[in-house]
Amino acid sequence: MKLTDSMNEIKGIGEKTTALYRKLKINTIENLLEHYPRYYLTYEEPVDIADVPIGQRVAIRATVNSYVEMKKMRTLTVVTFTAKDYTGSIKMVWFNAPFIKKVFHVGQTYIFVGTVSIRNYQKVMEHPEYYSEAKYLEKRKELQPVYPLTEGLTNQRIQKDMKAVGGVIHEMEEYLPLDVQNRYGLMEYRDAVRQIHFPLDYQQLELAKHRLVFDEFFLFLLSMRRLELHRAKVENHFTITESEKCSALIENLPYELTNAQKKVLEEIKRDLCGDSVMNRLVQGDVGSGKTIVAMLALLMVTESGYQGAFMAPTEVLATQHYENFRKMLEPYSVQVELLIGSTPAKEKRRIYQGLQDGSIDIVIGTHAIIQDKISFQNLALVITDEQHRFGVHQREQLANKGQEPHVLVMSATPIPRTLAIILYGDLDISIMNEMPASRLPIKNCVVGTQSRSTAYHFIEKEVSKGHQAYVICPMVEGSESTEMENVVDYADQLRTNLSAYIQVEYLHGKMSTKEKAAIMERFYANEIQVLVSTTVIEVGIDNPNATVMMIENAERFGLAQLHQLRGRVGRGKDQSYCIMINTSDKEEAKERLDVLYQSNDGFHIANEDLRLRGPGDFFGVRQSGEMLFRLADIYSHADILKQAQSAIQYLERENYDFENIQHYKLSEKLDMALNL
């Protein structure tokens, strides 16, 4: 077997499994070996039921002491029984697993592993793993990797295939310059890959993760450096002048721009009219009004006779932006079009023609607007929203659609300035840190699971006033982390707990674009009052009528991501609320969530997140949505990010040729990183 062999060369893998791997961008054995675990399960000494920490994964040794009951609840089959040890009892629960009834009998003792919560004053463990004493003894010796999955592909399947290709790891070539390895004490690449999948112990795993996190940051910063060198002081070929339409739009807004918006708009105008091409990042807190600033910049460009492009990270968000832009720019004779993956073929051809002949002024879309077949007559400004969702290569592709167009990237992800300067070395940075005067600060509360029913009553009260609510669950149906609330089951639970007149629906990442769009349309129209969702609604969704954000398992999210989620409410004139359910009794979880309780300032929260999480948190579940890395996390790995920056600076001092990398393997890795 070779690294370049396709996946169906692995014994037992057929066309169906190959297709599933392809969804994860795994086409070769080398791709598989670079598919790193998200986290590791460990199997600790069992604890007494009386001492179990709430909200944490634990093992307990307990004896079945009630008959197994099976009940039907709407679309759910619920299997339950009680187990006990000498210190207390606990309820075991499974959903849609009727076979469990035949597994357990009164008097049997097992080791149960799962997360304990409190329901109706009783300790509950949902979907626990269960082992005999002998089996658990074997499990104690393992650090079990848990991989990112796609529907139909199990963790056990990936583990099995990793073992099958483990012998090929020795072929993986080192690609970092030797002096960088030695200078920063980095583990050999092939050793790091072996230890990330088959760790001998915690110490080896930590060294492996350090090396691979370093690599991700190093390749990212190296690609940014090349981009920076390429774009340094590119001459501005566009004649852009002060815009009368801009002034008219500002005049006709139903509110006054904040001082921060005015300042950033002036910086953008100065760049557009200056001698060099703009490369600017606008970091604005959620709800600070970045979109109107982007609209004004695009209007200024179109009035000068050029075209603009606006790229959003999701089809739902792109469609929402399109509706807003079309409505607001119609009085100024600006032709705006939407181009997304689900746009019909005939409509796409019409838009391609309009972009080519210049009859379309602004195109709004997803990555569909960077396809090779699309060309512009005169593209002068490219804007990417939530820029951390796009790889460097995607940004570069979009920028290459014109003759060195101006580039504006926007992000609501609050990144401490010290880290932003490292990550966005090729960009000038503008900060938008002021909220519109009409916005009321969101009222926050952090509560335990015992207050869940009170939270439900509060949602009912807000809905009775005509408002709407979001409920966020961390996991999606089909995830192996079944101890967490999943959206499908949770929506059923809410339908049972809320009044019959309240329409509850769910939304998650595995739904088709058409399904998501239909749900969001009904939510905007208030046909749905409560939307249960995963973090797919995290970025940019704007429904001013939603006044409640309830987040389950809040302690499982990074603070920056919680702040993003909270930013989905508080967007209208009414008072909004964020309810965070903390299922952990750990002091650290309480301290972290208190930061959200005390503050609505995203940049303060980002700095606190960095302080509280600290460097080197290698074994926790990495939160999604913070950057484009597989393993690296800018908050908990801030020290390694700085180390990678130091390595780039060291190579620069050694006159390393960033534009013509001689080491072919490093060049290959860089190309792969650019295409992430």
Image: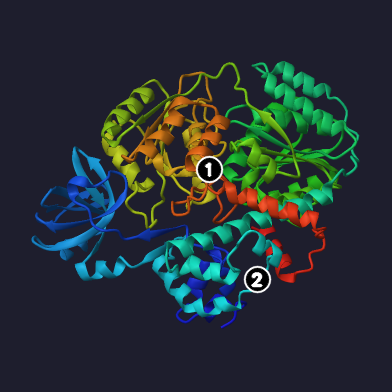
* Residue 91: percent from left, percent from top: 18, 49
What kind of element bears circle 1? Answer: helix
Query: Please, is residue 71 above or below residue 578 in the view?
Result: below
* Closer to us: 503 or 205: 205
Please tell me the numbered disc located at residue 414: none
Query: Please, is residue 559 above or below residue 209 in the view?
Result: above
* Closer to us: 583 or 354: 583
* Closer to us: 498 or 600: 600
* Residue 536: percent from left, percent from top: 50, 44
Colouring used for the render: rainbow
Identify residue type, mark 2.
Answer: Glu
Query: Please, is residue 189 above or below residue 9 in the view?
Result: above
Query: Please, is residue 669 above or below residue 286 in the view?
Result: below
Say whether residue 448 is left or right of residue 152: left
In the picture of the structure, the residue carrying the numbered disc 2 is 174
Task: Single out the mark in the foreground, 1 or 2.
Answer: 2
Identify residue type, mark 1.
Answer: Ala
The image quadrant that residue 450 belongs to is top left
Residue 71 appears in the picture as rendered: yes
Q: Earlier in the sequence, mark 1 or mark 2?
A: 2
Assign the C terminus to one quadrant of the image: bottom right
Say whether residue 274 is left or right of residue 396: right
Mark 1, Cα crowd under 10 Å, few <14 / some 14-19 / many 20+, is: some
In the picture of the structure, the residue carrying the numbered disc 1 is 517
* Residue 580: percent from left, percent from top: 39, 33
The answer to the question of whether label 1 and label 2 lie on touching residues, with beta carbons closer than 8 A, is no
Mark 2, Cα crowd under 10 Å, few <14 / some 14-19 / many 20+, is: some
The image quadrant that residue 593 belongs to is top left
